[in-house]
Image (tube, rainbow, N blue to C red):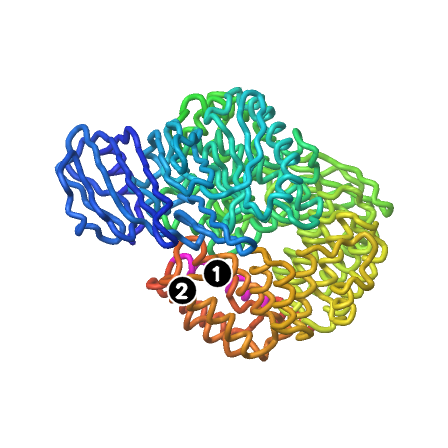
Amino acid sequence: MPSLTVDGARTRAAALTVQSYDVDLDLTQGERTFGSTTTIRFTATATSTWLDVKPDELTSVTLNGTAVDVAGLNDGRLELTGLRSDNELVVVASMLYSHDGEGLHRAVDAADGLVYTYAMSFLDAAPRIFACFDQPDLKAPYRMTVTAPPEWIVLGNGAATQVSPGRWELAETPPLSTYFVTVVAGPYHQLTDSHDGIPLSVVARQSLKEALEREAGDIFEVTKQSFDEYHRMFGYRYPFGEYHQAFVPEFNAGAMENPGCVTFRDPMVFRSAVTDGERSNRARTVVHEMAHQWFGDIVTMEWWNDLWLNESFAEYMAHRVSTDATRYTDNWIDFAFIRKWWGLQADQRSSTHPVAADAVKDALASLDDFDGISYAKGAAVLKQLAAYLGDDVFLAGVRAHIESNQFGNATFADLVGKWTEAGAVDLDTWARNWLRTPGLDTISASRTGAGITLRRVAPAEYPAERPHKLTVGGYDADGRATTVDVLLDADEVAVELDPSLAVVIPDAGDDSWAKIRLDADSLANLPAVLPKISDGVTRAVVLNSIRDAVADAELDPKLGFDVLVGMLPHETSDIAVATMVGWANSHLLGIYLPYQPYRGQLAATLAARLRTTAAGSSLQLAVARGYVRFADEADVLKGWLAGEGVPDGLAMDADLRWTVLLQLARLGAVGDAEIDAELQRDTSSEGVVHATRCRAALPTPAAKERAWTQIMTDADVANYELYAACEGFWHPGQLELTAPYVDRYFAEIAGTEKLRSGWVVASSAKLAFPRYAVEQAIVTRAADLVADESVAAGIRRSVGDSVDDLKRALAVRSAFAH
């Protein structure tokens, strides 16, 4: 299907005003399809336009009482002619349920065979559910009716009422963009509450009933606290009536901000023990989606190039509001270690782009920019802007923007105008340097006889003069800090700080967006001083600097490994431990460094740390997971599964058992029989996904071929199982076994676009990339694929990003032979 262009969208928006949608869905037609009848009322100033609809069968289309030839449907578009000033369009269709997390997704819970559905309309998926004019700036009110099995509940954007057994009517909504429209229908378990006059609920599968009842109190508490804070900050009450949070199966994203009915990944309803960092992450996701109710839902972008503003704003608010209003206080540690690192990598790839791009890409290509730049970099820049403007001006502009554009569409230029009215000066220059120019500065400190000189260097390919408002920290041998606030608005700025301090850290508070480099003296003193620095954010700044310097082939990866091994015995943050162990897995071992002997050294360090962590603590769980990932002591791991030798306080629950079994599978210490036995123990859908990952990890030709067939040819595999097969397939200890699949990846990956659509195509292409084949020949193969415009854009972007990372690995290996 041709993707909508910005010119096409502008032409249609100029010609049409959509007055209302009435959508009637029949979810009782069977396992494959559902009925969809849509009535659209709209005015027109042109005589022709087109309708977006992607049916299994288009039954009938009637425009102003006259039948339209359904044979005119071409690649998801139906031309409409003879438009009047006032029009009524009725479209009757049979639609396919999806299994890729987009459209109307249908999932069967392996635990009990119950069926669950939910609608994901994001980007261009709405026409897979109902006929529409699918673009963000044609907003309209929606009324929805749903026929479902009588034992189901139905939720959506408007309050749902069951008017007869299995028949539901949803209240009319305020004007919404098509990509926000949802319905959640199935035998979900629902818990209700209310706050400040707002009805609240959470729902999840019946097999997660006990977990939901255990977790609902925390979710409701965060929700209530955040409503109070957003009402205070924005001075504008939540306008969408009820507020449901639906934790749904096989959801691709973290969550989706559908007004009144937010959908989340249901692994966030924790069935097993999780770390404090994971609980904090869930809270931020809740707060993030709540921010969207104002920024994105009440005021919506005109075109997808301003999607960054929705996501950057919600990302910034998620960390800020979670810290200010909830019991979770490690948000900026998470931002530094995880979210910012995601964005820093994206901003250094060949696919980097401005935070605020011009409106040139079509809708589908805009999805490629839905990345760490649009989320994390944008959030960091907004944090800088709030500091630059002052919070009063920052929030005054946001409030005016919401008030003046409520239930409509707006652009970034509109928001800049409101900030300017609130008192901001020369924002255009600031925006040009920070938002319209890609890339990131490098900030370093050097010691002089009198103090410290702070330097700013912009990348040569993306010159800019970005002002950085930040803190420089100096640390003595005992980790005691002296900090100086600095405005780095020139290439060099003098800082009054004792040059004899053991460690000097630019941007010690992680307040800006830049590559941070430590001077030679600081690096030399780092192993002794870093464990004594008490601030978790500052430690994250240092470790990000190490990770980035290694990736740039400026720092020996062996030194990076030594820093990692040196910090583990002392680190108290589960977020830091999980992140750095994850870095060892994703970048160091088998990519920058040989898998052996470093695997053994890391496993031994983690095993020792496990013996010193508090029983039952979040840190113990993070360390245990890390140890299992790198352990080769099959007898120890099998003992854990049998309940023998398990560290005191460590719960061998379902998910940790699968983590242990996955490592045993990689080691070849178990086979299909043991995986099947564990699946008999855990018959849930989660268990099926875990089993798929374990089977893909088995070091046998038959297991690899089975997984590969699933990845490359199975059109019906559910998205989570597909991802699991990709995740289990490659391993640095199985290079010889998987070598034949490197060429097969490049020969076959383009064909997966015919099996699946949207998000899952790009995600599976990235997960299945042969990342441990660090060879120059792969760069050439990848370049050929990326240059082939017949290949789906999402696949080309995933391969391009992966090969950028591969080039860096080759450069590291060339610079430092180990």
Percent x, y of residue 733: 64, 74
> Which residue is more in the foreground, 432 or 37?
37
Q: Residue at x 36, y 54 (%)?
A: 32
Which comes before the other along the chain, label 1 or label 2? 2
Quadrant location of residue 794? bottom left
Does 290 sit left or right of 147 as displayed?
A: right
Do callouts 1 and 2 mark residues in contact (Cβ within 8 Å)?
A: yes
Image quadrant holding the C terminus, namely bottom right
> Which residue is more in the foreground, 547 or 253?
253
Percent x, y of residue 614: 83, 49
Q: Residue at x 48, y 35 (%)?
A: 261
Does 814 sit left or right of 792 as displayed?
A: right
**Residue that numbered label 1 is attached to:** 764
Specify the amino acid type for callout 1: Ser
Kind of element beneath mark 1: helix
Asked if the stretch drawn in magenta spans residue 174, the answer is no
Asked if the stretch drawn in magenta spans residue 799, the answer is yes
Q: Main secondary structure of the magenta part?
A: helix
Q: Residues within 10 Å of mark 2 (few under 14, many from 20)?
A: many
Quadrant location of residue 586? bottom right
Residue 381 visible in rendering: no
Q: Residues within 10 Å of mark 1 (few under 14, many from 20)?
A: many
Residue 56 visible in rendering: yes
Specify the amino acid type for callout 2: Thr
Magenta-tinted stretch: 793-810
Does 398 sit left or right of 565 as displayed?
A: left
Percent x, y of residue 19: 28, 28
**Residue that numbered label 2 is attached to:** 752
Q: Is residue 727 above or below residue 389?
A: below
Percent x, y of residue 438: 49, 47
